[in-house]
Image (spheres, helix red, strand yellow):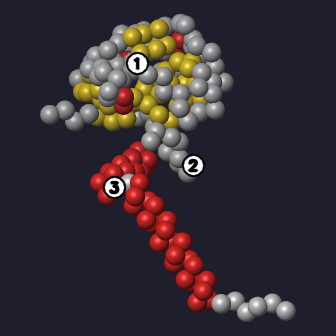
Amino acid sequence: MTKPLDLARLSQRLDQRMSEAARRVAQRTSRRSFLGKLGLMLAGASFFPLLPVRRAFGNEPPQDLAAVSEIGDPQSCDYWRYCALGGSLCSCCGGSATTCPPGSEPSPISWIGTCHNPADGKDYLISYNDCCGKSYCERCVCHRTERDKPVYFPAKSNDILWCFGTESQAYHCTVSLVLGEAEID
């Protein structure tokens, strides 16, 4: 024969154990320490959505504006779109200034620059996407640092390999996409 469950006794034991656990925590930590750790955890959690990772539903790499008039050679480091590019030109490695070569994929994460187009005299916001998944292309290596920022501004630095969010983190080359006309004050 089983004994009936005594809920009052069970509740009393649970209260006693919770009280003992709370006392142990209170003896080992101060309120300041607890609030500091809680604040740090909340501040850290607020930055989680800003991490540069590919989202499951969307955010494909930006598309190039087709209506921009252009002059110059896309296989030359002096081409106007490459004012903040650091790396190999995809136009020399089997792709174009705007498309990755076959066998590589564009990184969803990019750095940006503002370049002056001599064809129309306007400034444009340029997105630089690394193409990843193949070995390094050593042709047409450029390193232009016009308006480049130090690494503590990572979104504006061309010194970082941006092959995150792709199947392979092997860098191959870089494409440059015109995002739109820049508004410079």
Find out whether the residues at labels 2 and 1 contact each other: C-beta distance under 8 Å.
Answer: no
Helix, strand or loop under label 2: loop
Find out whether the residues at labels 1 and 3 contact each other: C-beta distance under 8 Å.
Answer: no
Q: Is residue 112 visible?
A: no
In the rendered view, tell whether residue 41 sits above or below residue 123: below
In the rendered view, tell whether residue 138 sits above or below residue 18: above
The residue under label 3 is 30
Q: Quadrant of the N terminus?
A: bottom right
Q: Residues within 10 Å of mark 2 (few under 14, many from 20)?
A: few
Helix, strand or loop under label 3: loop
Give the residue displayed 55% in from the left and 51% down from the top. 57
Give me the C-alpha separation between circle 2 and circle 1.
Answer: 27 Å
In-front residue for pair 29/99: 29
In-front residue for pair 152/4: 4
In-front residue for pair 165/175: 165
In-front residue for pair 70/164: 164
The residue under label 2 is 56
The residue under label 1 is 159
Q: Give amino acid for label 2.
A: Ala
